[in-house]
Image (cartoon, helix red, strand yellow):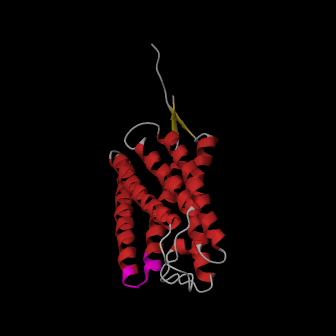
Amino acid sequence: METSTQSTGEQPVAIRLLLACGAIGPLLFIVVFLIEGAIRPHYSAWQNVVSSLSQGEGGWIQMANFIVCGALVLGFAIGLRRALRTGRGSTWGPILLGIFGLCLIGAGIFVTDPLLGYPPGASSTPTVHGTLHNLLSLFVFASLIAACFVLARREAADPAGHGWAWYSVATGILVAVFFVVTDVVALLNGPAGLMQRICIIIGWSWIALLAIRLMSKKVQRA
């Protein structure tokens, strides 16, 4: 009579590299916009949103930041699909994060319109590329929120994953709340930049931590 045994091993190198993209991209994105927001002349990190860094002198840095982060998260989505294999969220989790990455690339290509007084003296007349940027940004946050809940459902089925499931749910809720609060505060000429930065740091950090968590997991081998 034959018996089968299973052993655990490291993730294949290709998958680990793709998963690492999910840690590098979001953390790099956060570091770049925090530094740029602190040193850019006439820009207020308190009031101005991150997308406005794509405007004015040096705007190419934030444009590249969008594109690089989006490309890395897109790579992560591919690695995530291969790492999850089967089960709840194994299809839609990667798809949603793939949408996140693609839309972030688009948000870098289509620059936002001048907003909340930055750049100083620029016309705030809506443009096609600005409208596309706003639409793509909406999909960036919507897909991230949905991914949080989809992958939370997967982890909830595993007794060892309940803590991560609750963290994912909390992340999805907080990102949604701060996304709405950012728009409301912007209308009131308040600290929209601060609210959006909190939103981004919460959401992008979840992706990075998810990547790190998956990289540390062992895989089952027959």
Residue 116 x, y percent position in the rendering: 47, 81
Quarter occupied by residue 171: bottom left
- Above or below, 52 against 169 in this view is below
Q: Nearer the viewer, residue 27 or 116?
A: 116
Magenta stretch: residue 191 in it? yes
Q: Nearer the viewer, residue 199 or 19?
A: 199
Magenta stretch: residue 68 in it? no
Residue 203 x, y percent position in the rendering: 45, 63
For the N terminus, which image quadrant? top left
Examine the rendering and report whether any part of residue 216 can be seen: no
Residue at left 59%, top 86%? 42
Examine the rendering and report whether any part of residue 53 can be seen: yes
Q: Nearer the viewer, residue 113 or 206?
A: 113
Residue at left 63%, top 42%? 14
Q: Which residues are magenta?
A: 187-195
Residue at left 47%, top 16%? 2
Residue 64 x, y percent position in the rendering: 63, 64
